[in-house]
Image (tube, rainbow, N blue to C red):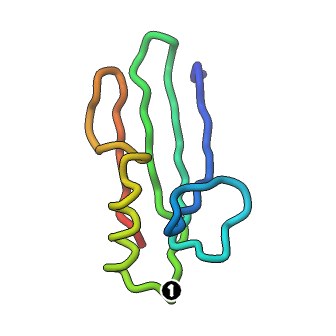
């Protein structure tokens, strides 16, 4: 049994990341899963793209994601946190 598991859906818009209902100008929707076996173990964060706006070219979506990329964090191990970022759709 895991110590801590959570999953949150985030929507990316030109103004940044939001939760709740997707904004009208939503670019992509991502799921962020966080799991940790105990209070002293590593925290695993897994980002997975669930939806991409078909009206927005991939290059434009990449630019918006890069602009607000600090929110996701860089992939890899950072202290006791391990971040995995899946490929966008």
Tell me which corner region of the image, top left, top right, bottom left or bottom right, holds residue 61.
bottom left
Residue name at image x 35 percent, y 63 percent: 87
Q: Nearer the viewer, residue 65 or 52?
A: 65
Q: Quadrant of the N terminus?
A: top right
The residue beneath circle 1 is 54
Residue lying furthest right in this view? 21
Q: Nearer the viewer, residue 71 or 84?
A: 71
Q: Position of residue 14 (x, y in %)?
A: 49, 69
Q: Compared with residue 48, is residue 63 higher up or lower down, i.e. above or below?
A: below
Q: Nearer the viewer, residue 43 or 64?
A: 64
Q: Residues within 10 Å of mark 1 (few under 14, many from 20)?
A: few
Asked which secondary structure carries label 1, the reply is: loop
Tell me which corner region of the image, top left, top right, bottom left or bottom right, holds residue 80.
top left
Residue lying furthest front in this view? 15
Residue name at image x 51 percent, y 73 percent: 27
Q: In the shown orientation, is residue 77 left or right of residue 71?
A: left
Q: Position of residue 71 (x, y in %)?
A: 43, 46
Q: Position of residue 75 (x, y in %)?
A: 29, 44
Residue name at image x 40 percent, y 68 percent: 64
Residue lying furthest bottom in this view? 55
Q: Position of residue 78 (x, y in %)?
A: 28, 29
Residue lying furthest top in this view? 40
Q: Compared with residue 46, is residue 1 higher up or lower down, i.e. above or below?
A: above
Q: Compared with residue 39, is residue 9 higher up or lower down, i.e. above or below?
A: below
Q: How many marks?
A: 1
């Amino acid at each position: 049994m895991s110590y801590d598991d959570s999953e949150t859906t985030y929507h990316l818009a030109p103004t940044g990341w939001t939760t709740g209902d997707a904004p009208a100008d939503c670019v992509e929707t991502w799921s962020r899963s966080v799991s940790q076996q105990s209070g002293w173990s590593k925290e695993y964060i897994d980002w997975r793209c669930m939806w991409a706006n078909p009206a927005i070219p991939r290059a434009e979506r990449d630019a918006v994601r890069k602009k607000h990329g600090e929110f996701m964090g860089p992939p890899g191990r950072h202290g006791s946190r391990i971040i995995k970022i899946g490929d966008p759709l």
